[in-house]
Amino acid sequence: MDEQMTALRTPQIDANYLDEDFNSYNWDMFSSLFRNYYSHLTHSFKHEFQLFLRLLTSYNTLLSSRHSTTIGQQLLQIKYSSVPLTRYQKFLYLSSFVFSYIYEKFLVDYRRLLPFQFIYKLLVFINFLVFLHGGTYINLFERLSRLKTVHNHPPSLRILDYSYMKRELIWHTLNETLGTLIPFITSLKARTLMRKYLSGTIMKQLQQTNICSVCEQSIVMPHESIGDCKHYFCYICAYSLIQQSCPICFKTINNIKPKEFFSE
């Protein structure tokens, strides 16, 4: 087995994304200094400031004799096979920053895709396809400087425990199931249907009282059904029962009218 094992594709891609995220975070922190004062400077000289920050970061990471790795590589325990970099490799690395600065500031047209932009994006895309096939040189800088990414230490096998994921899946499945069933079970139509077939067994048969059988509160503005069913409920509850079954006698309520109480 080789002393330096070529890094897997996933850590290389992740390291590249981490470097981009760090540059974005670095710019956000820097631009926040001018948010209240001289904010026009960050708009007028955005590309120059970003170039300065990238050079400053590189001086303390990859170009430093102490680290010789980028931020993403340090986090993922990978590095370039040739460290420290040679003068030629450092020149190409710094040139990539200058090229990005010129490209973003002068060559990019956000309204349409220029031929130069198309050729550059095509080269980047082809290089990425070759990287996916071979596993080396994720960007054009690495390919031109012949820098391979290797692991600091040979990767070891990890035993993955899926017990936590299983518990989460079971919980979310139960949560979704209950969230679907409970509104149906607690609906008036479902309760009336269950009371019709389970009355006298596991559910108590309802009787006409001064308590509304729908909202289970004292009846307000009593209204009764027009037809065979003479049970009465609150006005709002009775109105909601139109074209539905009475929860007491299970007869269909076609319409309602105010309840009239006759004194003997």
Image: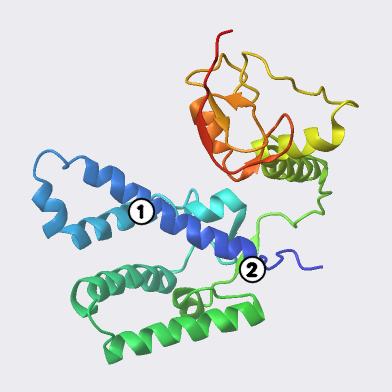
On the question of residue 80 being in view, the answer is: no
Separation (CA) of disc 1 from disc 2: 23 Å
Label 2 sits on a secondary structure element that is helix
Tell me the kind of residue under disc 2: Arg
**Image x and y of residue 214, in percent:** 62, 27
Q: Nearer the viewer, residue 78 or 68?
A: 78
Label 1 sits on a secondary structure element that is helix
Tell me the kind of residue under disc 1: Ser
Q: Which mark is residue 24?
A: 1
Q: Nearer the viewer, residue 162 or 219?
A: 219
Q: Residue at x 83, y 25 (%)?
A: 203
**Image x and y of residue 245, in percent:** 68, 40
Name the residue tied to disc 2. Answer: 9
Residue farthest to the top, as pictured = 264
Q: Nearer the viewer, residue 14 or 212?
A: 212
Q: Residue at x 77, y 68 (%)?
A: 2
Q: Is residue 4 above or below residue 203?
A: below
Q: Nearer the viewer, residue 59 or 211?
A: 211
Looking at the rendered structure, the number of numbered marks drawn on it comes to: 2
First in sequence: mark 1 or mark 2?
Answer: 2
Image quarter where the N terminus lies is bottom right
